Amino acid sequence: MFYAEDENCLIAYPVQPPQANPSMCWNWFRPEDQCRGRGEPSLVAGITRQIVKDYCVDRERVYVAGFSAGGAAATVLGATYPDLYAAIGVHSGLPYGAAEDMLSAFCAMRQGDLLKEFVGSDAIRDRQGPMPAIVFHGDKDKIVHPRNSEGIASSLKWSASCTDVRRERVNNGRAYTCTRHLDQNGRPALECWTVHGAGHAWSGGHPAGSYTDPHGPDATKEMLRFFREHVLPSDRQIEDDWSR
């Protein structure tokens, strides 16, 4: 909330009802929840559009981020609604198309294995350019294998070149490696942050929160910084699609 006030931005926190998932997690692994215009992606996109309309939000500066199942849902939204979100943030999440049912979801979470071909992929992903993304993952994560972070870029069809690898440490905290890529126009396109020694927790989160690690780099701050660097390009805007 403090970051939202400092940045003068709106943040929505959609909540999954227990009737939809007993753990109140997003159903990112079901085919019907990985497609445009259906299931949970259409609900979150609808919430986003309503907020943009009600509060006169700049349509070129709309972003989505999430942690764990929410991170996996963020990759789904980035892949299926590239005309709505200018960039995505994924923390301890999974690639788009990593699973197609509960069994393959647990396999992907534990091993980081990807499906060779995802039956739910849709045409709009092929018509639009890659989605800018900032990705965080702890290399000691025992719930979602860190290998999943490596597959997120490829699932969003990135072919960016690495420009620098930065290895640093938070004061009195964890070491981390940040690998930064640029797109063909030389703009920051993809950042992958590996937090060394961190488990399944939001890096830099408040110590009073659940699944937070206050000893790591501040993922919230870095995601907001990354988002500020991206606006929705004209070639990803589809005016008449906002009614769907």
Image (spheres, rainbow, N blue to C red):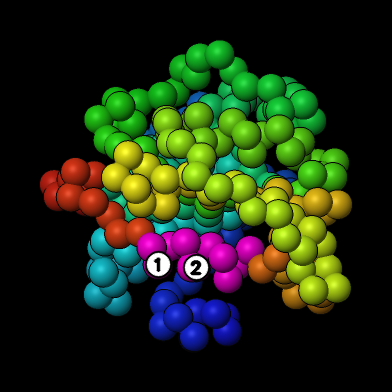
Regarding mark 1 in the picture, which secondary structure is present there?
helix
Image: 57 above or below 230: below
Q: Is residue 124 left or right of residue 238?
A: right
At 79% from the left and 74% from the top, the residue drawn is: 171
In front here: 129 or 82?
129
Circle 2 SS class: helix
**Residue 23: horizontal and vertical position, in percent?**
73, 49
| Residue sitting at the far left | 240
- Amino acid marked by disc 2: Leu
Q: Are marks 1 and 2 in contact (CB under 8 Å)?
A: yes
* Res 21 visible: yes
Residue 211 appears in the figure:
no
Q: Main secondary structure of the magenta part?
A: helix
Q: CA distance from mark 1 to mark 2?
A: 6 Å
Residue behind mark 1? 228
Image coords of residue 80 (percent x, y): 38, 38
Q: Quadrant of residue 141?
A: top right
The residue at 47%/61% (across/down) is 226
Q: Is residue 191 left or right of residue 123?
A: right
- Is 3 placed above or below 43 here? below
Q: Quadrant of residue 182?
A: top left
Looking at the image, residue 96 lies above or below residue 169:
above
Q: x%, y% of residue 178?
A: 63, 52
Please tell me which residue is depicted at 29% across the width and 76% down the height of the picture: 55
**The stretch drawn in magenta includes residue 222:** yes
Give the camera-side residue of 161 and 72: 161
Q: Which residues are drawn in magenta?
A: 219-229
Q: Amino acid at mark 1?
A: Arg
**Residue at horizontal 53 percent and vertical 62 percent from the top:** 223
67 drawn magenta: no
* 99 left or right of 12 in image: right
Q: Which residue is mark 2?
A: 224
